[in-house]
Image (cartoon, rainbow, N blue to C red):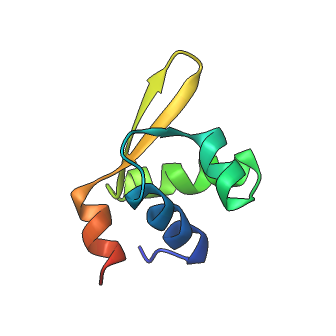
């Protein structure tokens, strides 16, 4: 599955982060709705381009090595 422009923006954002970020942080920094960020993050998770985990009531995300490779292609 190909990544679209929003997916690329998310991966670019995540590659600059030193620690996991929340869906809310991604949405705020990319100026998209929370729902849009969440949908794209789950799509990237299914493609193994990001890892996600539930912490309390938040989802936290971090880019994978495969995500880094995909971004630099």
Within the image, what quadrant is residue 24 found in? top right
Up-down: is 60 above or below 46?
Answer: above
Q: Position of residue 67 (x, y in %)?
A: 32, 63
State the residue at coordinates (29%, 66%).
68
Up-down: is 42 above or below 19?
Answer: below
Q: Quadrant of the C terminus?
A: bottom left
Q: Position of residue 12 (x, y in %)?
A: 46, 67
Q: Is residue 49 left or right of residue 23?
A: left
State the residue at coordinates (31%, 79%).
72
State the residue at coordinates (60%, 41%).
23
Q: Is residue 27 left or right of residue 17?
A: right
Q: Quadrant of the N terminus?
A: bottom left
Front residue (pair 12, 42):
12
State the residue at coordinates (60%, 69%).
6
Q: Position of residue 69 (x, y in %)?
A: 25, 72
Q: Is residue 6 left or right of residue 20?
A: right
Q: How many marks?
A: 0
Up-down: is 2 above or below 60?
Answer: below
Farthest bottom residue in view: 73
Q: Is residue 49 left or right of residue 5?
A: left
Within the image, what quadrant is residue 49 found in? bottom left
Up-down: is 23 above or below 70?
Answer: above
């Amino acid at each position: 599955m190909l990544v679209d422009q929003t997916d690329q923006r998310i991966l670019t954002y995540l590659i600059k982060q030193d620690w996991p970020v929340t869906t809310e942080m991604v949405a705020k920094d990319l100026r998209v709705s929370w729902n849009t960020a969440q949908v794209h993050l789950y799509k990237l998770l299914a493609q193994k381009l990001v890892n996600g985990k539930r912490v309390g009531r938040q989802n936290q995300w971090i880019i994978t090595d495969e995500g880094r490779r995909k971004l630099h292609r």
